[in-house]
Image (cartoon, helix red, strand yellow):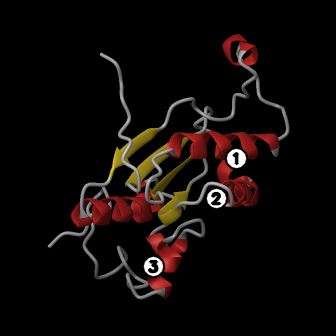
Amino acid sequence: MRYRRANIPGGTYFFTVNLADRRSRLLVDRVEALREAVRRVRAPHPFRIDAMVVLPDHLHAVWTLPEGDADFALRWALIKASFSREIEKTERISASRRAKGEREIWQRRYWEHLIRDEIDFARHADYIHFNPVKHGYVAKPADWPHSSIHRYVASGRLPADWAGTGTEVDECGERSG
């Protein structure tokens, strides 16, 4: 069976993008290089970042693409390439990647999911914001510096103690009740 990605122009998508070395801390150690790569790509290829979290070895994001545009694959390829150019070449590169002129920084594939409705959006945004707690990096989501939760709190969309004391959230970051 051939794997096919959803390509809905103007769609909203959830992504998980991983480093090749899942023990690495490269994304948080070089978070400014990642931010700059995203900025460089968004200038010619705009998209809205609805939610995002950057963890040491992977990131999650929800993006909305412009009307008439479904090319998230190009955007991810450009972000990965731009970030990789900023990283010193210290990794061991496999023969297959070397033959294709690739680095060994990112996993080749990534996970994408087309957001279907407001409930689906809320679940994925909650998952993103709760992810640093799930992985044991912090006790509450607002303690993680590399997260859009700070934007949600500043705008009043979430309380500062969301998923902290007084808020019931399951292991996936979904609100109960």
Q: Which mark is residue 14?
A: none
Mark 2: which secondary structure? helix
Q: Which residue is mark 2?
A: 42
The crowd level at tag 3 (other Cα within 10 Å; few <14, some 14-19, many 20+) is some
Quadrant in which the N terminus appears: top left
Residue 25 visible, this orientation? no
From the image, state whether disc 2 or disc 1 is nearer to you. Answer: 2
Q: Nearer the viewer, residue 51 or 59?
A: 51
Callout 3, which amino acid?
Tyr
Residue 120 x/y as whole percent: 26, 59
Asked if 169 appears above or below 45 in the picture, the reply is: below
Q: Which residue is mark 1?
A: 26
Callout 1, which amino acid?
Leu
> Which mark sits nearer the N-terminus, 3 or 1?
1
The crowd level at tag 1 (other Cα within 10 Å; few <14, some 14-19, many 20+) is some
> Which mark sits nearer the N-terminus, 3 or 2?
2
Residue 18 visible, this orientation? yes
Please give the name of the residue rendered at 28% of the width and 78% of the height, measured from the top-left corner.
Answer: 167
The crowd level at tag 2 (other Cα within 10 Å; few <14, some 14-19, many 20+) is some
Q: CA distance from mark 3 to mark 1?
A: 25 Å
Q: CA distance from mark 3 to mark 2?
A: 21 Å
From the image, state whether disc 3 or disc 2 is nearer to you. Answer: 2
Q: Which mark is residue 152?
A: 3
Quadrant in which the C terminus appears: bottom left
Mark 1: which secondary structure? helix
> Which mark sits nearer the N-terminus, 2 or 1?
1
Residue 171 x/y as whole percent: 30, 57
Q: Nearer the viewer, residue 9 or 12?
A: 9
Image-quadrant location for residue 158: bottom left
Callout 2, which amino acid?
Arg
